[in-house]
Image (cartoon, rainbow, N blue to C red):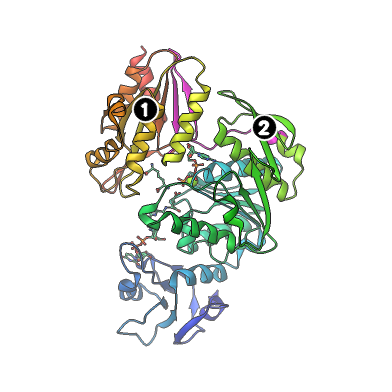
């Protein structure tokens, strides 16, 4: 059992009121999850302020409270720890409480707008294939070896994350691959972790609802690399405009990958088809099952990570050539009538553009492309018109529909998407708010040889409407509609 003094190690405190010898059984950010012996950490959130729930936490059994300002009424038997930034303190306290699991394993963090899940998942599969027991922290799922633990966030909060890493370490994982979202970096969810390597995929428009400006979004991602230790490596995509900026101030060993210029890990696409990619990777010709130019970048990120981690290049390429992508990333089904249905998690303008361009390059049949696209509610509104515009420019027909409306009116989201369409785009587009109906319409419009892209939800098994998650699975719906309309 830990005392408060143990978990305060290396935490700069402003003021400590009470006995630091008190025993701490658990850490919590949420007053509703507090039980006897818990240390509660009050965080100023986007919706509410954890400081308003200190009383509730104490009622539920908290013995210690971390806060940025002391409550007006302090209770004698409770220890108050005042710190400058409770979010940062939460991460450092969690590291102490869970005995710094990240320094006992090789932890690799992947950041960037698109490709994090893909790169982290392929790394997990590759290193598992190389014979290691691995952990995965991702949008789709968390994994400890073969055990699946459902994911609630791309990157969990600092306490859940350290608890998860401790379990991974205790259960024998030697390598862990985790996505580091920009929200997570900004909210200190990854602060204090010992990374063996950091990987940058790319940066394009997303999350400006949260970060406000693109410059702020870039700065947050860069901070991740600024904080890497000198023993780590930092691997970046130098074909991205901001790829080298990311590593500008890092102490880690710098490594680069590219499809177009000199780099430590250099790739060239020789063939790009629905059966996969043929690429030169550091002058070695290899066939991969992954599809599209964007996946050529993901392959280089994975290859560069494995080699930087000291693995053998021949063995890495042998296993990598057999691997498929993460669930819901360019998943395709060919119907009885030879219509190709693709489910992809493209939910940013750049991802949508990449996926539609890839489809355009693969489409040797001369068939049309029908895109079913929506945008999430309570998320970056600026994406909406841009995603509709990209869809209209790169497809023959577009069906604008709902993604996860969350607390917003789907009709309003669709109207904001429609605002991005010019006259030609408007002629190609139909708006159908019901996502199932939208997929049905796409299938009914398709002829043999056409390609239907259902974008935005990928692996998700639900649609979130006003706080309720109803079962919804794009792949399942697409198959159902093929069955129904191709009898
Ligand atoms: C915008 C955002 O990131 N929000 C995260 C944030 O919540 P918040 O700031 O809104 O918290 P809040 O509701 O205002 O509450 C403030 C504090 O009071 C506490 N509280 C609240 C109520 C109460 O009764 N008692 C109590 O103690 C809360 O536990 C919290 O600690 O802190 C919470 C606890 O860590 C997170 O669960 C929550 O994620 C929400 C659910 C979310 O949707 N986050 C998304 C945007 C997100 O993080 N996405 C990225 C992925 C992005 C990508 O992949 O592209 C991710 O990493 O998942
Ligand atoms: N390297 C890449 N560059 C650009 N687009 C990509 C890349 N890799 C994947 N994509 C596209 O982005 C979509 C999301 O990919 P992925 O889930 O790997 O990204 P992510 O960064 O984990 O996203 P999230 O921020 O939601 O966690 C894919 O379905 C595909 O359309
Ligand atoms: N991690 C991303 C996922 C978006 C997925 C899309 N289906 C949506 O709901 O907008 C986010 O939370 O912004
Ligand atoms: Mg992800």
Relative image position of residue 31 (x, y in whole percent): 35, 68
Q: Name the secondary structure under disc 2.
A: loop
Q: Can residue 338 be seen in this snapshot? A: yes
Residue wearing tag 1: 477
Is residue 319 covered in magenta? yes
From what the image shows, is residue 300 above or below residue 186? above
Q: Nearer the viewer, residue 429 or 477?
A: 429
In this image, 323 relative to 18: left or right? right
* Mark drawn on residue 321: 2
Is residue 310 covered in magenta? no
Determine if the C-beta at disc 2 is less than 8 A from ligand 2.
Answer: no
The secondary structure that dominates the magenta segment is: loop
Q: Can residue 472 be seen in this snapshot? A: no
Relative image position of residue 112 (x, y in whole percent): 52, 49
Cα–Cα gap, marks 2 and 1: 30 Å
Question: Closer to the N terminus: mark 2 or mark 1?
Answer: 2
Q: Image quarter for residue 224?
A: bottom right
Judge the density around disc 2: few (<14), some (14-19), many (≥20) Cα neighbours within 10 Å. some
Q: Magenta segment range? A: 318-347
Which residue is pictured at 58% across the width and 33% down the height? 324
């Amino acid at each position: 059992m830990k005392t408060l003094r143990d978990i305060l190690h290396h935490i700069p405190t402003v003021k400590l009121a009470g006995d630091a010898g008190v025993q701490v059984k658990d850490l919590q950010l949420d007053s509703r999850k507090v039980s006897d012996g818990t240390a509660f950490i009050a965080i100023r959130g986007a919706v509410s302020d954890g400081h308003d729930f200190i009383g509730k936490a104490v009622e539920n059994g908290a013995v210690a409270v971390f806060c940025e300002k002391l409550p007006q009424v302090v209770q004698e038997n409770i220890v108050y720890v005042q710190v400058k930034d409770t979010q940062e303190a939460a991460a450092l306290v969690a590291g102490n409480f869970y005995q710094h699991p990240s320094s006992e394993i090789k932890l690799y963090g992947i950041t960037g707008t698109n490709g994090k899940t893909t790169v982290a998942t392929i790394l997990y599969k590759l290193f598992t294939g190389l014979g290691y027991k691995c952990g995965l922290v991702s949008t789709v799922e968390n994994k400890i070896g073969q055990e699946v633990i459902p994911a609630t966030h791309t990157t969990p909060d600092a306490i859940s994350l350290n608890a998860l890493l401790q379990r991974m370490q205790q259960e024998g994982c030697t390598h862990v691959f985790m996505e580091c979202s920009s929200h997570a970096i900004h909210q200190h969810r990854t602060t204090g972790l010992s990374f063996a390597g950091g990987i940058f995929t790319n940066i394009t428009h997303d999350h400006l609802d949260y970060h406000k400006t693109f410059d702020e979004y870039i700065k947050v991602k860069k901070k991740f690399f600024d904080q890497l230790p000198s023993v780590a490596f930092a691997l970046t995509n130098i074909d991205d405009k901001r790829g080298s900026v990311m590593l500008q101030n890092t102490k880690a060993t710098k490594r680069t990958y590219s499809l177009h210029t000199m780099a430590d890990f250099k790739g060239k696409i020789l063939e790009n088809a629905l059966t996969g990619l043929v690429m030169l990777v550091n002058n070695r010709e290899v066939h991969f099952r992954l599809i599209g130019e964007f996946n050529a970048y993901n392959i280089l990120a994975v290859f560069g990570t494995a080699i930087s981690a000291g693995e053998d290049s021949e063995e890495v390429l042998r296993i990598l050539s057999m691997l498929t992508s993460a669930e819901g990333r360019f998943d395709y089904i060919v119907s009885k009538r030879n219509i190709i249905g693709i489910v992809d998690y493209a939910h940013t303008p750049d991802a949508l553009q990449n996926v539609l361009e890839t489809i355009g390059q693969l489409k040797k049949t001369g068939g049309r492309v029908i895109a079913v696209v929506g945008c999430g509610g309570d998320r970056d509104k600026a994406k909406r018109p841009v995603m509709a515009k990209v869809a209209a420019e790169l497809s023959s027909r577009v069906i604008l529909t709902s993604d996860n409306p969350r607390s917003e009116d789907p009709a309003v989201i669709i109207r904001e998407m429609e605002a991005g369409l010019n006259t030609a785009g408007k002629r190609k587009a139909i708006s159908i708010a019901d996502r199932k109906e939208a997929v049905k319409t796409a299938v009914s419009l398709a002829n043999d040889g056409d390609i239907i892209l259902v974008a935005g939800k990928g692996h998700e098994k639900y649609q979130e409407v006003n706080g309720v998650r109803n079962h919804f699975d794009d792949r399942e719906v697409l198959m159902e509609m093929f069955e129904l309309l191709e009898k």
